[in-house]
Amino acid sequence: MSNTKIQIRSPHLEGAEVSWFAPICNGDDRYMGERNMAYKSTFKNASEILLTADKKGYRNILCPSSYLVGQDTLPFAAAVAPMTEQINILAAVRCGEIHPPMLARTLATIDHILKGRFTINIISSNLPGEDASSEDRYQRSREVIEMLKQAWTQDEIDFKGQFYNMKLSSLPAKTYQKDGPLLYFGGYSPSAVDLCAEHCDVYLMWPETEQNLRTLMENMSAKAATYGRKVDFGLRVHVVVRETEEEARAYAASIISKLDVEQGVKLREGALDAKSYGVSRQAETREKSDNEGYVEDHLWTGIGKGRSGCGAALVGNPNQIIKKLNRYMDMGIRSFIFSGYPHKEECERFAELVLPKLKTFSMPIEQGKITEEEPLSPLGAGVRT
């Protein structure tokens, strides 16, 4: 085991940010491999899940990004924002899709609508139709992040890089939050780790064994220290919780009971991140699992047979799930993004059986990111009322 100590950005916060997932990318169903149009990604269905999570006490909700299926992330977030009461929104932004100054202004607008209950998930995968190298993709993301930060914290954007070269006023892009929203980030390559260590606030991981997660956290802590920084850690994972472990395991198995092998491969390979190092790590974890798909106690990898990206679920009764989450929190994980099949029903079940027994917090609010400034005046850019 490494001697590197895991250093977290928010050691003063007790508990965790407990979040849910809005399947705006058409990822909702009762059974993988069997499309039920009742779960189709529509604004009605996806917003109902988000608003359910809001009412049930979740602190944040991830709105993912995809070109092939579903809805566009930022219009969805902007449309549902005025309907929310207390939940944060974690919007995935694929760097390079929107010209950075316009992206800065769009994100600032949503931040004002939400009065600071806004967080950003930085995505660096290929744009639709693109086949860029990992180094280029992360360099582009680095440039986008640096310009966003200039827009949110300085009077002008003044940048020269590999992908962008510009100088202009940043006044139209000022956010509600001091210095802009928190940046969440996931990636495993050296370029990805370096980018997160230098610029981002929460390092999101996909489920692996506890030892593998610990190693990832140690490596990130060491890299962040070279920049004089610390990051918080998050885990994106599915969950199946029932009154008994037997019920949970049976339900988990039923999720993939109608999925054939070829169909699963097609579903996985259709994603824009299908060839990423992170996805390959999920496959390696799945290959190490037992005959029922469990790679360690209560961590089931069967989900990964039918989807790219996050490919495992926590499975068990409420006490087992809470015990597992406490182990993660003891390691230093501060944020969890859960999901289940179907998403609304499992959101309600987790909120009933597990959520009341967890101490939770909201990242932007608890970290002092929220200001008391009023939104930008409609009378002119940069004018505050």
Image (cartoon, rainbow, N blue to C red):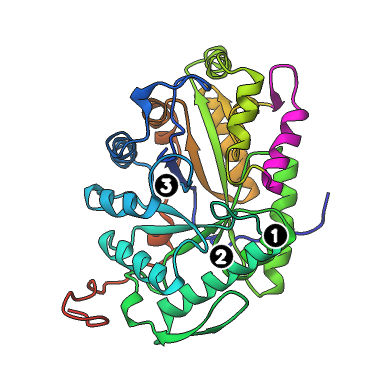
Label 1 crowding class (10 Å Cα cut-off): few <14, some 14-19, many 20+? few
Say which quarter of the image contains residue 196.
bottom right
Question: Which residue does the image show at 48% across and 47% down from the upper left?
Answer: 67
Question: Which residue does the image show at 29% across and 36% down from the upper left?
Answer: 48
Q: Secondary structure at mark 1?
A: loop
Disc number placed over residue 63 in the picture, else none: 3
Q: Nearer the viewer, mark 2 or mark 1?
A: 1
How many badges with numbers are in the image?
Answer: 3
What is the distance, in whole Å, between disc 3 and disc 1 at their CAs?
Answer: 26 Å
Range shown magenta: 275-296
- What type is the residue that disc 2 sits on? Cys
Does the CB distance between marks 2 and 1 fall below 8 Å?
no
Say which quarter of the image contains residue 346.
top left
Q: Which residue is mark 2?
A: 200
Q: Where 325 falls versus 30 (above or below)?
A: below
Disc number placed over residue 133 in the picture, else none: 1
Front residue of 332/257: it is 257
